[in-house]
Image (spheres, helix red, strand yellow):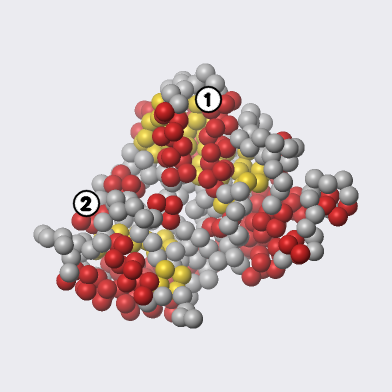
Amino acid sequence: MKKVIYADNNATTAVAPEVFEAMRPFFTERYGNPSSIHTFGADLSREIERARAHVARLLGAEHDTEIVFTSCGTESDNTAIRSALASRPKRRRVVTTRVEHPAVLTLARFLEHEGYEVTYLPVDGRGLLKLEELRAAMDENVAVVSIMAANNETGVLLPVEEAGHIAHEFEAIFHTDAVQAAGKVPVSLASGAIDLLSISGHKIHAPKGVGALYVRRGLRFRPFMLGGHQERGRRGGTENVPGIVGLGEAARLAVAHAGEEQGRVRLLRDRLEKSLLAISDSRLNGDLERRLPGTTNVSFKKVEGEAILLHLNEHGICASSGSACTSGSLEPSHVLRAMGVPFQFAHGSIRFSLGRFNTDADVDAIIEVMPGIIETLREISPFKD
């Protein structure tokens, strides 16, 4: 089998070997139900609590009990926003941004059909949010503000702590989708600005199908998944013990490898990016400084992003033209449209997202083939000056 060069870590990451080994016994040997009275099942509750402590440490949560395990980031986002609305029933407004992940934007559009008013804040040409835009949008009818910590397409970091303080001035609940930020950049909960925070396991080398929601202690909470007493009554359903154990181990490893993400991975990204921008008629999408260490989003004029991906795939290189949750759409990225990226560049955007399993050889391979791919595609491009 041809070696695959995986440069799409914002979509999903490989399960770390240590995570896989930590999960293994819970598939074949320790497979009981944590809600059982017998010891074979009940002992697993200790493993869940150990994982909860690791996730709490990764996020800087003061109390382990502030962590609620879910199935994914999308469930965490839906739970957070719906809980906020249910706990503020007289308030009928939601404030978010135009560059959110579909997990938030699709819910926001659904809420509009249910009679809620949703304000979509703009970003500037670098993908940055101006806090004065948020303040101008706020009033006493806003129930919840939901702003992502890091954009999944550009890697741009948004000022969520400052935004949370503004939301609290109007007694609104503040939620952040930190799916891309957790484990890659420090997340601060100490100030109390963030009430609800979503993460997903498969972004930090845990398996798919497990996530978590931080719920600030003392916050009025309404569960989305109703059923049994699991997660202290905050999320019904039998716990996914292997997945939760895996997420806990991945969180522990993310803390241990935090320096590598900020150092070696950033250097790999910068070297790749410098080479890509040396190709004629290319541009960087997003802020140069305030972004994730492993993400670069570059556009090439008069080239289709999907065509670039197909050519990269022939070389065994995995990248993305946007969010994995919107792949298949021929429309330019909603994120790039919100940033005002010109049409001929927006169609030719490619996102490379590197992680701690990427190597110098991976970057060398991408650098070697990209100029030829762009040249070939421009020769047959339907776009004209």
Q: Is residue 131 above or below residue 38?
A: above
Q: Which residue is mark 1?
A: 171
Q: Tag 1 or tag 2, which sits nearer the N-term?
A: 1
Along the line of sight, which residue is nearer the eye, 291 or 367? 367
Give residue 25's position: percent from left, percent from top.
76, 64
Q: Which element type, helix, strand or loop, lies under badge 2?
A: loop
Location of residue 169 with respect to 56 vertically, above or below: above
Q: Nearer the viewer, mark 2 or mark 1?
A: 2
Residue at the farthest right position: 38
Q: Position of residue 270 (x, y in %)?
A: 38, 67
Question: Is residue 53 visible to the viewer in this orientation of the structure?
Answer: no
In the image: residue 278, left or right of residue 199: left
Q: Is residue 244 above or below residue 265?
A: above
Q: Position of residue 113 (x, y in %)?
A: 42, 28
Dot 2 surroundings within 10 Å: few (below 14), some, or many (20 or more)? Answer: few
Amino acid at the residue labelled 2: Pro
Q: Which residue is mark 2?
A: 342
Q: Residue at x 75, y 61 (%)?
A: 26
* 274 sits to left or right of 251: left
Quadrant containing the C terminus is bottom left
Residue 95's label in the rendered image is none
Residue plotted at (49% across, 81% down): 1
